[in-house]
Amino acid sequence: MTVFLQLFVSLVIWGIVWRFTAKYWRKKGWGPAISHVCAGLSGFVTAILILALLAPAHENEVGSTARENEKNPSKESMQRRETGASNSAALTELPQTFTGVPSTETQWPTLASITVPVSNDEREFLHDMACLDETECYGEKRFERYIMGTYPDLKKIKFVRPNEVANDDEGTVSMLRQQFVQGLYFAKRIKLANGQSLFDFMQSCSGGFRENDSAESSYDSKNDSNYFTLQYFVALRKKSNGDPVELTLTFDRRGNQIIANSPFFSSNVLRYADFLARHNVKCATADRL
């Protein structure tokens, strides 16, 4: 029996019980109001009892239909099951490393890292970070002298003051220049997956370094340690149409590790020799187009 029919029968019974009960109470001498109230309540209770008796039959009917469908599944339900199974299989076959296609959460690409030994000067500078008097500690100027002494060719690369920084803001200009020089130092030391140093890649493929390429010393309060944050802005071109595009490399220098801050371009340059092809880009310099 359908739900609609059950409700209809219950309402009919309610009305019948209400009518005859009201007449009965009126004959007993009760007033119109009290007679109809009592009659209505009596009809309601009776209708609820009838509905309760009819409901199990409907549940049994639904349950038997469901069991029958389970034993003899329709063509549509079988197709839905097969589609779901094929989708699950497709998800499990997704690559474990980033290839440019969507990944499931468990297959999200991880951050790449490489080992680069820490020089004594780098260690001392990081230990004495924010040194103001180089007669008592290892400061920025001393670290710069070490960098230029280790890589003399860096002296040819000039720092260009950013337009947004005032020329007379000597403190900011000096800080940005120091971070720029430190960025060149680490670019010399980072080896990419294609065998080039990051320095050679930036010079030959990106047209050189810009004022925002830098390595800044920072403090990690959570781990109570000093480290460097590195960033490089790589000028490239789209392989499809040659339009210019800029991709960013960001790393942390922690201990003897260079750790990518992104699982995509920053990780891929350390992990895959064909990192340019993976991002559908090519070198921006004219002689490398």
Image (cartoon, helix red, strand yellow):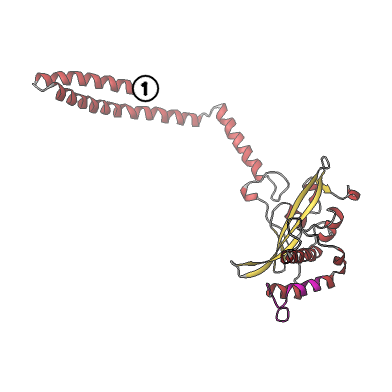
Which residue type carries mark 1? Answer: Phe
Magenta part of the chain: 130-147
**Quarter assignment of residue 259:** bottom right
The residue nearer to you, when weighing 256 against 101, is: 256
Return the x and y of residue 148 as percentages of the image width and height: 83, 70
**Quarter assignment of residue 116:** bottom right
Tell me how many marks there are. 1
Q: Locate residue 87 relative to residue 271 in the image: left or right.
A: left
Is residue 152 something one can see in this rendering? yes
In the image, farthest residue toward the bottom: 135
Return the x and y of residue 232 as percentages of the image width and height: 76, 57
In the image, farthest residue toward the left: 29
Q: Residue at x 29, y 23 (%)?
A: 10
Return the x and y of residue 115 as percentages of the image width and height: 74, 66
In the image, residue 37 above or below residue 225: above
In the image, farthest residue toward the right: 287
The residue nearer to you, when weighing 160 against 113, is: 160
Q: Which residue is mark 1?
A: 4
**Residue 134 forms part of the magenta stretch:** yes
Say which quadrant the N terminus sits in: top left
Return the x and y of residue 143 as percentages of the image width and height: 77, 73
The residue nearer to you, when weighing 164 against 135, is: 164
In the image, residue 221 above or below residue 10: below
Q: Residue at x 20, y 26 (%)?
A: 42
**Residue 24 forms part of the magenta stretch:** no
Q: Residue at x 37, y 24 (%)?
A: 3
| Crowd band around label 1 with a 10 angstrom C-alpha radius: few (<14), some (14–19), many (20+) | few
Circle 1: element type: helix
